[in-house]
Image (tube, rainbow, N blue to C red):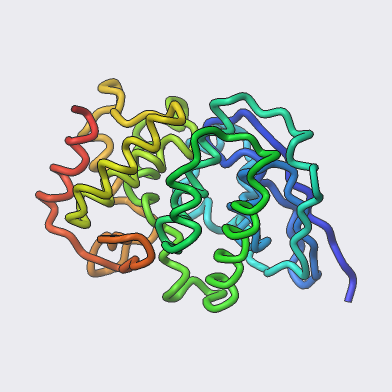
């Protein structure tokens, strides 16, 4: 079988994950070669790499989440290659690095155990000192994706924080927040819906420590955010299902939540 290599690169775009672009061709095996820290964590499985990096900003706003999903790469890669020291050569602004960290924070919450302990205690974000975090996050995602390639069950845990996060991105026209910043806010909403106030407070503290937003800009209308949430691309006939997590390492998928509670969790972000 012929082999195709996907090379990801960094970008300062506010509407896609830095370093997560791909050139997928169906039927060809491939290697994932992430070039930035976020790419190494989020795109570790060489699956669902965001080809939306190839879409102009104007077109990106026009596309619906469902149409956008059709231009994702869906094949697992043969290998994932993170070159030793390679991540340190990609000079990202601090804001981009912090936004990328949210993916590791999310993965730590999902995995629990040693990874959560490592992520929660990080005082600074120096890619040269984070090889173990990259490896642990990559291994976790690879295991999840390999167990559920078609996104029919277990893989849905990776959507933690993304339901509200994607709604914030849509409501702000994909201009106000980096992807990781929006997902960080989404994590706070998800933990409120999980009835995990102490864990929410800790995650809020972690986000603040790394200069990430914990309060939603009033310019992003609450009604627009709630309306965008109802258009979530993973919505089913039963409604919008959330990934909830009462404690690290114990995610629950497809959770239907009282709309009043969802509204309260979103409105709390503005306080």
Residue situated in front as seen by the camera: 33 or 50 = 33
Q: Quadrant of residue 227?
A: top left
Rendered position, 122 above or below 152: above
The image shows residue 108 at horizontal and vertical percentages of: 46, 55
Q: Quadrant of the C terminus?
A: top left
Q: Residue at x 35, y 53 (%)?
A: 232
Q: Is residue 60 at least partly visible in the picture?
A: yes
Residue 202, position as x, y percentages in the image: 30, 43
* 112 left or right of 261 in image: right
In-front residue for pair 271/122: 122
Q: Quadrant of the N terminus?
A: bottom right
Residue 228 visible at all: no
In the image, is residue 87 above or below residue 270? Answer: below
The residue that appears at 22% across and 29% down in the rendered structure is 270
Residue at the farthest right position:
2
Residue 249 appears left or right of 40: left
Q: Give the residue drawn at x 79%, y 43%.
A: 85
The x, y position of residue 206, in whole percent, is 39, 38
Q: Residue furthest toward the left?
A: 260
In the rendered view, would you say 124 is above or below 199?
above
Q: Position of residue 176 (x, y in %)?
A: 43, 25
Apparent side of residue 261 relative to residue 212 in the rendered image (left or right): left
Q: Nearer the viewer, residue 88 or 166?
A: 88
- Furthest toward the top, the residue is 219
Number of marks present in the image shown: 0
Say whether residue 95 is left or right of residue 206.
right
């Amino acid at each position: 079988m012929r082999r195709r290599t996907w090379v990801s690169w960094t970008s300062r775009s506010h509407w896609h994950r830095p370093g997560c672009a791909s050139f997928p061709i169906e039927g060809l095996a491939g290697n994932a070669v992430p070039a930035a820290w976020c790419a190494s964590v989020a795109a570790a499985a060489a699956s669902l790499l965001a080809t939306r990096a190839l879409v102009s900003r104007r077109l990106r706003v026009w596309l619906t989440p469902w149409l956008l999903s059709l231009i994702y790469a869906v094949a697992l890669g043969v290998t994932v290659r993170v070159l030793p020291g390679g991540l340190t050569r990609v000079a990202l602004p601090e804001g981009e690095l912090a936004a990328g960290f949210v993916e590791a924070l999310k993965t730590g919450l999902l995995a629990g155990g040693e990874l959560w302990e490592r992520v929660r205690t990080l005082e600074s974000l120096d890619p040269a000192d984070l090889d173990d975090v990259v490896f642990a996050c990559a291994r976790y995602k690879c295991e999840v994706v390999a167990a559920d390639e078609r996104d029919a069950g277990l893989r849905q845990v990776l959507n933690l924080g993304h339901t509200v996060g994607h709604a914030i991105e849509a409501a702000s026209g994909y201009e106000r927040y980096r992807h990781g910043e929006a997902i960080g806010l989404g994590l706070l909403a998800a933990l409120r819906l999980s009835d995990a106030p102490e864990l929410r407070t800790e995650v809020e503290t972690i986000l603040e420590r790394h200069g990430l937003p914990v309060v939603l800009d009033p310019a992003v209308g609450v009604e627009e955010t709630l309306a965008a949430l109802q258009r979530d691309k993973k919505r089913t006939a039963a409604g919008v299902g959330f990934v909830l997590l009462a404690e690290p390492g114990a995610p629950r998928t497809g959770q239907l939540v009282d709309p009043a509670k969802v509204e309260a969790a979103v409105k709390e972000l503005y306080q």
